[in-house]
Amino acid sequence: MTAEGFRRGVRLGVDVGSVRVGLAACDPGGTIASPVETLRRDARGGSDVERIAAEARERDVIEVVVGHPTSLSGRQGAAAQAARDYAVALARRLAPVPVRLVDERLSTVSAHRALHDAGVRGRRHRAVVDQVAAVTVLQVALDAERASGRPPGSLVEPGTEPDDPAGTPKGNAPG
């Protein structure tokens, strides 16, 4: 049974790393997340953002969720800022498709553990851990929306800082 307000439709999940970006997608019913691919992070050329945009168009997604790595204490460090910046770049590129930041505490740790438990080691492990982390981010977002009936995380507006979960703006749009 789904919560009232759960939106049907394909979503993409993104796990942003300094070297690689994991990409996952869900089925049209929004039931289960599956790995798509691992992209090489391209901070200068933006080919990774373009690839995500192409995947979003191809799958006709209703939104993209980006993992936001907040520490267990709730503090936001350099990785959280990098994910926020990446989400803003995606929001600009994908508009009007919404981009949301969702808490991804321990998603990469969970991905490493799952791969280790499955006997995946070495280079093969590195090649897929970002996809598995993206699956975790997306599945957590789907489950949260199903439980609450509300879209997960915080909406990222193109050209602005995302709102916090309480809805307090963290920045201003460039003028």
Image (cartoon, rainbow, N blue to C red):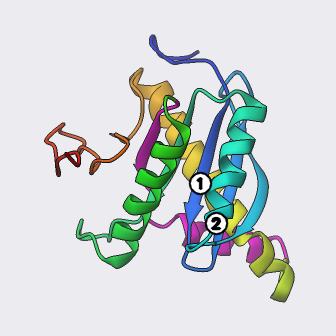
Q: Quadrant of residue 18?
A: bottom right
Q: How far across and how far down the image is residue 169, in percent?
A: 16, 43
**From which residue to which does the magenta span run?**
97-119
What amino acid does circle 1 point to?
A: Val
Q: Quadrant of the N terminus?
A: top right
Crowding near pointer 1: few (<14 within 10 Å), some, many (20+)? many
Residue 33 in sight in this render:
no
Q: Residue at x 74, y 43 (%)?
A: 55
Crowding near pointer 2: few (<14 within 10 Å), some, many (20+)? many
Q: Is residue 141 above or below residue 6?
A: below
Q: How far across and how far down the image is residue 108, in percent?
A: 57, 70
Which of the two labelled residues, at mark 2 and mark 1, occupies the earlier sequence position?
A: 1
Identify residue for label 2.
21
- Using the image, tell me which numbered label, if any, was put on residue 50: none
Please identify the residue farthest to the left as the structure is shown.
Answer: 168
Q: Quadrant of the C terminus?
A: top left
Q: Is residue 77 above or below residue 80?
A: below
Q: Quadrant of residue 14?
A: bottom right
Residue 116 in sight in this render:
yes
Q: What element does badge 2 sit on?
A: strand
Q: How far across and how far down the image is residue 78, in percent?
A: 34, 78
Q: Are marks 2 and 1 in contact (CB under 8 Å)?
A: yes
Please identify the residue farthest to the top as the structure is shown.
Answer: 4
Q: Which is nearer the eye, 14 or 72?
A: 14
Q: Residue at x 62, y 69 (%)?
A: 45
- Name the side, left or right, on which 86 lies relative to 45: left
Q: Is residue 144 above or below residue 111?
A: above
What amino acid does circle 2 point to?
A: Val
